[in-house]
Image (cartoon, rainbow, N blue to C red):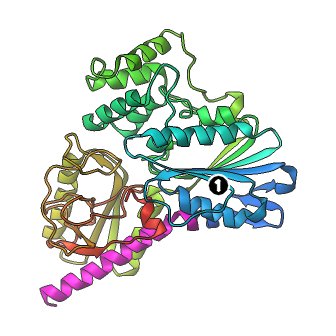
Amino acid sequence: MSVEKEEHALRRDALQILHAALGAVDPSAAVRRHVRREGNQLLIEGERFDLERYRHVFVLALGKAAYPMAYALQVLLGRRLDRGVLVTKYGHLAAALDERWTVVEAGHPVPDENSVRGAQALAALAEQAGPEDLILCALSGGGSALATWPVEGLSLSDLQAVTDLLLRAGATIHELNAVRKHLDRIKGGGLARFAYPATVVTLVLSDVVGDDLSVIASGPMAADPSTFQDAWRVLNRYGLLERVPLPVRLHLEAGLHGRIPETPKPGDEIFQRVFHHIIASNRLAARAALEEATRLGYHPLLLSTFVEGEAREVARVIAAIAKEIATTDNQSPARPVSSGAARPRSPCAGAVGVDGTRSWCWQRPSPCRAGRIAWWPPWGPMGSMDRRTRPAPWRTARACTGLTSWAWTRWPICMPTMPTPSSRLWGI
């Protein structure tokens, strides 16, 4: 087979595997798979909710996949839906919802004024719900920045500064959210406090390694195991205690000394009627990729779905594995698959990385024409599939599941962008 034909075949297979992974975690399809309606019975993961028992049914949708999830729920509930609030990233609305919805587009990865408006709208509707009401909450990646409501004594600029400092320092999403949850009114179970005593069912598209409910979108409906002490330690670990705004440090100090109550913890009564269901995740996408690769005749190996660390170091390890396969495995095509959330330690101007942090500094101009992305193998100039801001419109399908590094060729693979509701989920 000629090099050109081999490249074409690899490119075709890469796209098929990519589409299989995306299809497995498509937000709208995930809602339809896990939520069904039989007359007035709402079936969610084996649990039945009798819609006749509830006076009102509300939907709260937050995250980069909020629109497709909200639209699927609107279709499913029909006239039984009373009101909804949708908060998503700018440009992530595919079409207008009906008049029952309040829609807010906000900033990500650093929150803006609309992030505050969005958080307040979510809290206001949640607070209206009573013990005879049902709230369906649809959460996806990006919710931490998209809905932000600073606690009393802090400003939006304070939270923006803290977020930016932690992103630039290379903090993990767990560390970042441990801090944010203690500076915000709806994070860390805060939204559940507004919703109490209503029944709440939360549908989650996980963008977090390990699917920790208290970390996904900063756990607005989940009990928070982190403490003020944890938040303080994160800032201290990265040498930021003297660099964060003074009101932030004073607020955390007050929490350390018990002058400010902690976030709601496991066992709190506000969670007695709150249920969570993870309907799509990083692992699900990786498994779908493996199945499709196997169907195409490859012998895939799932290295890990818990890949974390500084991006350059992660890339070097994956590159070494890929090089070993390329050098020694002559019997069959191999497809190492790994996923997670590698992050850079140093920012580059204008580029955004896997989990909202800044992108890697070792970029190279795209060899592809406009409207397509270049995917280089780990031993090439880029260590994993990633978005670049110049010169091509770097749209990839990588953020929520953190898909990285399927290495099988020494040449870049140019793949078309996919302006669909599912691709909009992945941080585009």
Please name the amino acid that badge 1 sits on.
Answer: Trp
Is residue 16 highlighted in magenta?
yes
Taking depth in this image into account, of 47 and 422 the one nearest to the observer is: 422
Question: In what quadrant of the picture does the N terminus appear?
Answer: bottom left
Image point (26%, 73%), residue name: 372
Q: Position of residue 293 (x, y in %)?
A: 37, 75
Q: Position of residue 33 (x, y in %)?
A: 62, 66
Q: Residue at x 66, y 31 (%)?
A: 193
> Which residue is at 67% across, 59% downward?
99
Q: Is residue 361 visible?
A: yes
**In this picture, is 215 found above or below 406?**
above
Q: Find residue 128 and report its image quarter.
A: top right
- In the shown orientation, is residue 312 left or right of residue 57? left
For label 1, the residue is: 101
Residue drawn 76% across and 60% down? 42
Along the line of sight, the residue nearer the viewer: 121 or 346: 121
- Which residue is most to the right? 52
Task: Tell me: 365 left or right of 406.
Answer: left
Query: Which span is picked out in magenta?
Result: 1-29
Q: Is residue 288 inside the magenta stretch?
A: no
**Secondary element type, mark 1:** strand
For residue 268, side relative to residue 406 (left or right):
right
Q: How many marks?
A: 1
Residue 218 can be seen, yes or no: no
Q: Residue 300, percent across and down?
A: 33, 69
Asked whether 263 or 117 is in front, the reply is: 117
* Mark 1 closeness class: few <14, some 14–19, many ≥20 residues within 10 Å: some
Q: Quadrant of the C terminus?
A: bottom left
Q: What is the x, y in percent for residue 349?
A: 19, 47
Overall secondary structure of the magenta section: helix
